[in-house]
Amino acid sequence: MSFRITSSTVRTIGLVAVALAVLTLAVSCHAGGVSYILVEPPHPGTPAPASVLREAAGDSVVNARFRHVRFHMWPGVALQLDALTGRMRSTRPDGVVSFDDKQSFVLGIDSGVVGLPFDDLSRLMNTYVFAYRGAPLKDLSFTTDGTHLVQKGVLHKVVDIPFELTAEVSATPTGEIRVHPVSMKICSIPGQGLMEALGITLAKLIDVSHAKGVRVAGNDLFLDPTHLLPPPAIAGRLTNVKVEPTRLVQYFAAASDHVPPASVVPDTDAANFMLFHGGTLQFGKLFMVHADMEVLDLASRDAFDFDISRYHEQLVAGYHRTTPTDGLLVFMPDLATLSDSGSPKR
């Protein structure tokens, strides 16, 4: 018996060899370690090769830590993440957490101290929470007179009525921020006693059914910190809130039935950083499976000023270094140091 090797046989052998090579790489990746997959999506937001990522990553959760980060969520609105640990859980079918798609994940907070400066809170209320036609409140601003939150603005009720409300803030058992008025001025005239005499409450005066993350009961305003902000969405249990001279500070803890993962230790002793570990991260054309990335502030004298909507500009203006375990140390300049073109200011 004789065998005749044809050109089609050679092509078949070649295809088998390629398939075995791909299989070997997939098994190696699944066994552990960080891997990078470079792709060129035809359109922004195009999912990664799902079968490859599922085999490589094995989960859809990226553990995260933030320390001294000013995290921009909305134009002119940034959260001060003094210290936060949590999990970025992918909402996509391919299990990817994408920096290019703020709706691709939910940040579940295990523990955290989060500050919201009063100027940023004012912009959040005016340009996001109450930014709709017929909103009952506008031109809102927030300050403090010690331990109380002072809110000024305009109440729209047939005509525009200036008001000033001084309130105590506290955390409810359900994780909302309760804003309880202790005094109120309407057109610079004390109005709380008059409202009580007439049987009028804030709930009767304003309809906040179209506002984001806000409800009213009696004279109290209730703010839901998990729905008050634009994407990326957050989830967590608010345990305490207090007023500081320049900001509102929120304290978060994990749900009682949740066991936080073991703490991920930074690769450096940097004062300001964002740390990501496990799962699959996407930034631009790069997919990092079994993620191991620490993003560091080039100037550590103040908080790391980071904007997820402009991260690519900060990435280009900085540099990165590969660690011995194939992780990444990424060094970025503060957002405020970039010019409008994305290059560092000179």
Image (spheres, rainbow, N blue to C red):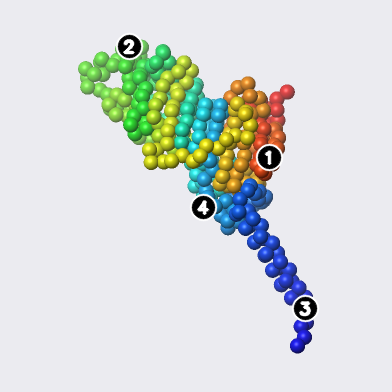
- Calculate the distance from the C-alpha at mark 4 to the C-alpha at mark 3: 43 Å
Circle 4: element type: loop
Q: CA distance from mark 2 to mark 3?
A: 98 Å
What amino acid type is highlighted by mark number 1?
Thr
Q: Nearer the viewer, mark 3 or mark 1?
A: 1
Q: Earlier in the sequence, mark 4 or mark 3?
A: 3
Inter-mark Cα distance, 4 to 2:
56 Å
Which numbered disc covers residue 323?
1
Residue at 21% across, 17% down: 197
Circle 1 crowding by C-alpha within 10 Å: few under 14, some 14–19, many from 20: few
| Looking at the image, residue 225 lies above or below residue 102 | above
The quarter in which the N terminus is drawn is: bottom right
Q: Residues within 10 Å of mark 2 (few under 14, many from 20)?
A: few
Q: Amino acid at mark 3?
A: Thr
One can see residue 10 in this view:
yes
Name which of mark 2 and mark 1 comes first in the sequence.
2
Residue shown at the point (47%, 30%) measured from the top left: 112
Judge from the rendering whether residue 290 lies leftward or rightward of residue 345; answer left or right.
Answer: left
- Return the mark for residue 189: 2
- Residue 64 is situated, as x and y percent measured from the top left of the image, at 54, 38
Gap in Å between the C-alphas at discs 1 and 4?
30 Å
The image shows residue 272, relative to residue 4, as above or below, that is above
Which residue, as the protein is rendered here, is positioned at the far bottom? 1
Three-letter amino acid code at the position of disc 2:
Ile
